[in-house]
Image (cartoon, rainbow, N blue to C red):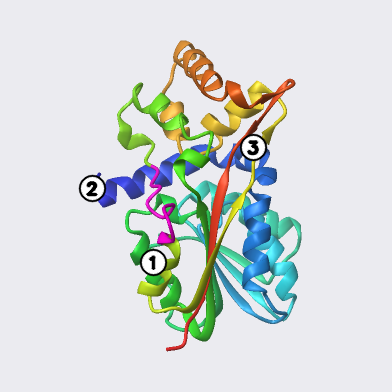
Amino acid sequence: MEPALQRRVQRYGWDKAASYYEQYWQRQLEPAQNKLLEMVALQPGETVLDIACGTGLLSFRMAALVGKQGSVFGTDISDNMIGIATRAAQERELTSVKFTRMDAEELLVADGIYDVSVCSLGLMYVTDAPKAVKEMVRALKTGGRAVAAVWGQRNRCGWAEIFPIVEHRVKSEVCPLDFQLRAGNSLERTFLEAGLIDVRSERINAPLEYKSADEACGAAFAGGPVALAYSRFDEQMKKEAHEEYLESIKSFKKGEGYLVPGEFVVAVGLKVK
């Protein structure tokens, strides 16, 4: 797909997903976020750039860790995600957290001004992941740290059949997802190629727990990367897609709900020049 088109698709797709995102994904993404925070070890007073911040779930956790003397600047390609995050910051009366719509591959920030650059579950969706990582590094001070989390191997993510299920009903361009950083130590290698040192990565198994079929379908279709495609389905197509998806995860059924395999990869590195 032509990069500019893919970015537009991502922008409008996540706009569609924004109002459902926290409902279906807040609990599911916590294991990856916990590991990311453990590996980056934020300190009071640090300045943080949170790229692809979504509704600010991780941004607010990081704001608490860096305290009032620190700050968090969240960016996301989706206007609606940024709107939700901004309203949440206002409701919490947090002045140390700001949010702005911005493309991860073209960050409109100065060189070398942040202590930490973070991208949690966003690098899979950009058109050029190495470029996005270089932007993360460019924004860092000397001695700063970059950390990112991505989905793991496709065959270890039990929900991944959602993509062919949607793609054969609509043009594939409306639901792009890249598993390019999943294999071997690809994320770690991308960090090294961007000039980071002391790079290390960890894989974690984190099953996605859904209490019902409706919750499993809501997360897969309405709250994630295929939301734009899903919005084009008529009611009959939605019904058929739900049935096909539930069939694809039936082996993970636990009582009335589902425990779907999931894997995350988290990497951290240091900027020295």
Q: Residues within 10 Å of mark 3 (few under 14, many from 20)?
A: many
Q: Is residue 154 visible?
A: yes
Q: CA distance from mark 2 to mark 3?
A: 30 Å
Placement of 33 over or under 170, stated as above or below: below
Q: CA distance from mark 2 to mark 1?
A: 22 Å
- Name the amino acid, label 2: Glu
Q: Nearer the viewer, residue 95 or 103?
A: 103
Indicate which disc residue 24 carries: 3
- Magenta region includes residue 183: yes
Q: Quadrant of residue 144?
A: bottom right
Q: Which residue is mark 1?
A: 190
Question: Is 177 left or right of 44, judged from the image as shown?
Answer: left
Q: Secondary structure at mark 2?
A: loop
- Name the amino acid, label 3: Tyr
- Magenta region includes residue 123: no
Specify start and end residues of the magenta stretch as a single range.
Answer: 177-186
Q: Earlier in the sequence, mark 1 or mark 3?
A: 3
Percent position of residue 266, x then y: 55, 61
Percent position of residue 24, x then y: 64, 37
Q: Nearer the viewer, residue 45 or 177?
A: 177
